[in-house]
Image: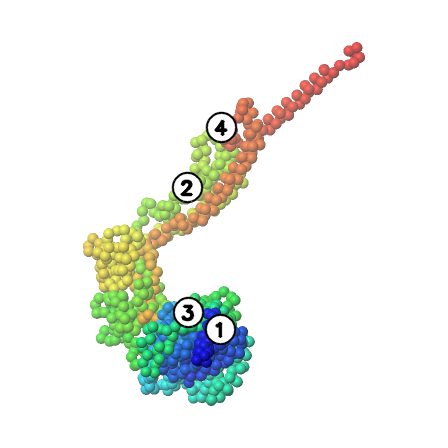
């Protein structure tokens, strides 16, 4: 009986020791910890990860400084690409009191297993599940120890933007991994003002025929930028089918996610036929910094694979490096867990106690009590591994995400640059840029040149016209008012006019052919609304629109316009009448404001000269009436340079020189303007400009269908009841001739280009004032159309070589009467043309007066005592001093000097007399001693 008791005691002690608990409740460190791993062992990533993780376990167990003698026991289960098996294998691992699971490899399995990890509080560390939707909020026990696809898609978006492409086709596996990755790509492209034009899913179990059918659909699309986001297991099959369909030739761009770089790194001797299928493809590889630890592990890798694989050595890919670091990260976290007093203990899950059925022992699956504490330690690890610094951000992403951009060439690949979330695209390693300020500007983005499919180094355009035999439908407004711009031959589908010639000339400059067909829009009787045609372009009813389309803010929200091929703007056209000369024609050269300012300056200069000359010059002295007459005479006589008064003060001469220069300019300009007014025929209109037209209540005409209607009502707040739509040039003429009193309009508002054509044969009307808007005409295309960009470049080339002007001269001959306008108003001289001269003259006057005042004050200070003695012998007050100063300033300078000189002489003579008296007194007061005796 005693033996049985002792045996039971030994069993209980061993159980407690294995659980890390001593008999007296004191914590002990267990000798062995169970950790699991689930991934597809036969996959490109899985076979590398198995070797890397086993090597990491061996390294950790051989280093007692990490876990203090505790050994890690690794159990690896194969998911065999199956979601169901992945879930089952994870549950099996939990039966053995596993404290952490490395994996799973695939994101779709990670979504399932993460729920299990949450339930049993077992941390799940995945080195390959890159789905960005695996968030910590939904899956708190899931820890991604590799880079998220969010950053990989950001890198692809930067590459697309760097090469100037705008539309991308996404070809992806139709599961959580593919859908969520492409959703992230769409968001990143939108940030770069690019877009996913099409999302094309591929069935995870699709046959080759299904792949070919999908690729045929892609080949019929306009974009040639294809992003392939799938798995290594059949990604090469997709590229082989694309090669078979001639979709790996010149013009195509294939950007493949990092599964391809993993294949290239793992199988360095890939079959030549497979290499032929991927020539010119761009792919990404997770970037790992160069370090001594990485160099040693890479050197050790060949020995590890020779020992652990049956098919000989295999290459090391980035996922293998992250798998190795994942095990070390877990070991450091467990070590910190023990240092903080953590216990390895499990408790029963009450939810599973009643679910034991058959071979599935649910009751043996227990909750890891220290799971939350271990998870916190995992997220707080800060170490350096073979991949570089390892640390988690607040979003549970690894710091410093970066990728290499790889170009497949010949029998291998070439790195053409790097991408990092810190600095974007560069040709230097990302760590070299971390010390500098972040710079994501377009000028700082660089990649080396790439070799594209078809063995070409010329950057592909990125799009073609759909290969469906359909011509582009180009909408053309049925213009009935200005055939010079657009007109359709009667009974034919031929169009002609300025806009049509520009369009065809631009197409000839494109480096490729554009199949198109011009389609009329409108009934041919009424001018169609341009807005309606543009709306149909935005709805893909038409592929483009050609005509007199003004580029406005509202329209650019619907469609993309090319570079403007003609400048225009809204103008006012009104009837004009000839102006006959009258008795007051001599006042016309200057505006009223100009006359007022000129007259004021004549008086100001006269007063300034009088002040400066008054004390020195007898011509500017005398009775008040005479002095006022002198000021007026002198001021206005300078107009003819006939002033007879001489000037003796240097300051007044300076002012006079500058003023005579101003008068010379004014008289010359006045003479020229008056000559023009009296010799050239003058025209006048009751409408002066757009402001006077808006302020009136007269009806206003506009071209039906143009943007002028919305502009007048929305921007100028003109009541719609005042607007009269007009369809033909004849209606324009009749409405303007009749006028508002006879059912017509007081003016017509239309674009300048159209009005110049209208006025070329109708000189009784004219453009009033200047353009009050600045716009241009352009061709319209659907949003993000790549053809709009190429057309814009061609328009600039057409303008530079002079062909655009020649087309303009061919169709739009401008008559002299279209530019007459309010000629009289244009010939009048405004103050704004001469304000600089007046400012110069005014500054000279102020400066001269200031200097003169300083001189007067100094003289007054010198002669003040003399003047005071002359005027009064009593004490001086402030008012008396002011009166003395005023009389001093009004007195002639010579008189003041004479008085001062006279006073000095009197002082000198008085001093001599006083001195003589003092001497006589001294003599009379002295006594001779002898006489006194």
Q: Nearer the viewer, residue 103 or 897?
A: 103
Graded by Cα atoms within 10 Å as few (under 14), some (14 to 19) or many (20 or more), the crowding at tag 2 reads few
Q: Secondary structure at mark 3?
A: helix
> Disc 2 and disc 3: Cα gap in Å?
90 Å
Q: Dots 2 and 4: beta carbons under 8 Å?
A: no
Q: Dots 3 and 4: beta carbons under 8 Å?
A: no
Q: Which residue is mark 1?
A: 29
Q: Secondary structure at mark 2?
A: helix
> Disc 3 and disc 4: Cα gap in Å?
96 Å
Q: Earlier in the sequence, mark 3 or mark 4?
A: 3
Q: Nearer the viewer, mark 1 or mark 3?
A: 1
Q: Earlier in the sequence, mark 2 or mark 1?
A: 1
Residue 49, position in %: x, y? 45, 81
> Disc 2 and disc 1: Cα gap in Å?
104 Å
In terms of image quadrants, where is residue 508? bottom left
Q: Secondary structure at mark 4?
A: helix
- Specify the quadrant that holds the C terminus: top right
Q: Residue furthest left?
A: 742
Residue 370, position in %: x, y? 42, 70
Graded by Cα atoms within 10 Å as few (under 14), some (14 to 19) or many (20 or more), the crowding at tag 4 reads few
- Specify the quadrant that holds the N terminus: bottom left
Q: Residue at x 33, y 75 (%)?
A: 352
The label shown at residue 879 is: 4
In terms of image quadrants, where is residue 293? bottom right
Q: Which residue is mark 3?
A: 372
């Amino acid at each position: 009986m005693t033996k049985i008791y002792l045996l039971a005691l030994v069993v209980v002690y061993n159980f407690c020791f294995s659980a890390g608990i001593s008999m007296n409740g004191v914590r002990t460190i267990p000798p062995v910890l169970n950790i699991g791993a689930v991934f597809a062992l036969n996959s490109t990533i899985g076979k590398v990860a198995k070797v890397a993780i086993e090597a990491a376990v061996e390294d950790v167990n051989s280093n007692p400084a990490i876990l203090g003698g505790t050994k890690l026991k690794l159990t690896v289960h194969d998911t065999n690409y199956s979601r169901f098996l992945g879930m089952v294998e994870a549950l099996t691992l939990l039966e053995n009191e596993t404290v952490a699971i490395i994996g799973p490899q695939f994101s779709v399995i990670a979504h399932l297993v993460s729920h299990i990890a949450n339930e049993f509080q077992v941390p799940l560390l995945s080195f390959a599940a890159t789905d960005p939707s695996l968030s910590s909020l939904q899956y708190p026990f899931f820890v991604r120890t590799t880079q998220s696809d969010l950053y990989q898609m950001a890198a692809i978006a930067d590459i697309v933007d760097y090469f100037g492409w705008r539309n991308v086709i996404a070809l992806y596996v139709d599961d959580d991994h593919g859908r969520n990755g492409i959703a992230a790509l769409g968001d990143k492209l939108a940030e770069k003002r690019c877009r996913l034009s099409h999302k094309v899913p591929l069935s995870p179990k699709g046959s080759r025929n299904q792949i070919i059918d999908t690729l045929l659909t892609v080949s019929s699309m306009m974009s040639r930028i294809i992003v392939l986001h799938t798995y290594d297991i059949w990604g090469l099959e997709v590229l082989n089918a694309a090669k078979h369909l001639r979709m790996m030739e010149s013009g195509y761009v294939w950007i493949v996610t990092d599964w391809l770089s993993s294949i290239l790194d793992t199988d360095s001797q890939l079959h030549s036929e497979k290499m032929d299928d991927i020539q010119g493809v761009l792919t990404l590889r997770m970037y790992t910094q160069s370090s001594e630890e990485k160099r040693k592990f890479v050197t050790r890798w060949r020995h590890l694979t020779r020992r652990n694989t049956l098919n000989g050595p295999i290459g090391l890919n980035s996922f293998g490096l992250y798998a190795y670091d994942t095990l070390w990260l877990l070991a450091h976290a467990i070590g910190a867990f023990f240092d903080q007093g953590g216990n390895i203990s499990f408790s029963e899950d009450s939810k599973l106690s009643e679910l034991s059925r058959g071979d599935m022992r649910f009751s043996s699956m227990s909750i890891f009590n220290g799971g939350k504490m271990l998870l916190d330690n995992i997220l707080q690890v800060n170490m350096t591994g073979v991949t570089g610094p390892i640390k988690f951000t607040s979003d549970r992403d690894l710091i410093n995400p970066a990728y290499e951009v790889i170009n497949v060439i010949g029998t291998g690949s070439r790195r053409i640059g790097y991408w990092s979330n810190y600095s974007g695209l560069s040709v230097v390693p990302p760590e070299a840029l971390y010390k500098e300020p972040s710079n994501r500007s377009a000028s700082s983005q660089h990649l080396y040149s790439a070799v594209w499919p078809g063995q070409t180094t010329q950057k592909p355009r990125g799009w073609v016209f759909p290969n469906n035999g359909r011509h582009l439908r180009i909408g053309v407004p049925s213009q009935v008012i200005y055939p010079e711009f657009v007109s359709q031959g009667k009974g034919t589908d031929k169009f002609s006019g300025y806009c049509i010639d520009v369009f065809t000339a631009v197409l000839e400059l494109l480096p490729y052919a554009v199949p198109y067909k011009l389609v009329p829009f409108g009934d041919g009787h009424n001018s169609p609304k341009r807005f309606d045609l543009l709306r149909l372009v935005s709805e893909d009813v038409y592929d483009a629109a050609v005509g007199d389309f003004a580029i406005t803010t509202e329209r650019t929200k619907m469609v993309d316009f090319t570079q403007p091929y003609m400048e225009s703007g809204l103008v006012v056209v009104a009837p004009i009448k000839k102006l006959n000369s009258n008795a007051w024609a001599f006042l016309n050269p200057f505006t009223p404001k100009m006359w007022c300012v000129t007259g004021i300056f004549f008086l100001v200069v006269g007063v300034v000269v009088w002040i400066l000359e008054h004390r020195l010059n007898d011509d500017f002295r005398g009775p008040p009436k005479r002095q006022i007459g002198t000021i007026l005479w002198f001021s206005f006589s300078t107009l003819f340079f006939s002033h007879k008064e001489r000037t003796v003060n240097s300051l007044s001469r300076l002012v006079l020189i500058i003023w005579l220069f101003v008068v010379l300019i004014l008289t010359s300009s006045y003479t020229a303007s008056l000559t023009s007014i009296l010799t050239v025929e003058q025209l006048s209109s009751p409408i002066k400009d757009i402001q006077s037209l808006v302020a009136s209540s007269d009806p206003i005409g506009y071209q039906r269908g143009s943007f002028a209607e919305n502009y007048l009502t929305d921007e100028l707040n003109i009541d719609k009841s005042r607007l009269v739509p007009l369809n033909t040039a004849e209606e324009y003429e009749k409405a303007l001739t009749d006028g508002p009193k006879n059912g017509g309009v007081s003016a017509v508002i239309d674009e300048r280009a159209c009005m110049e054509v209208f006025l070329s044969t109708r000189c009784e009307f004219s453009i009033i004032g200047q353009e009050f808007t600045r716009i241009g005409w352009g061709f319209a295309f659907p949003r993000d159309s790549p053809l709009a960009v190429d057309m814009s470049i061609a328009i600039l080339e057409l303008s530079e070589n002079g062909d655009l002007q020649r087309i303009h001269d061919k169709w739009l001959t401008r008559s002299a009467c279209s530019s007459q306008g309010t000629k009289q108003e244009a010939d009048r001289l405004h103050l704004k043309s001469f304000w600089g001269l007046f400012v110069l003259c005014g500054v000279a006057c102020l400066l001269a007066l200031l200097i003169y005042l300083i001189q007067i004050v100094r003289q007054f200070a010198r002669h003040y005592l003399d003047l005071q003695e002359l005027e009064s012998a009593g004490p001086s007050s402030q008012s008396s001093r002011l009166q003395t100063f005023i009389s001093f300033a009004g007195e002639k300078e010579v008189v003041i000097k004479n008085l001062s000189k006279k006073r000095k002489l009197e002082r000198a003579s008085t001093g001599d007399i006083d001195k003589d008296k003092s001497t006589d007194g001294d003599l009379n007061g002295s006594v001779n001693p002898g006489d006194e005796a």
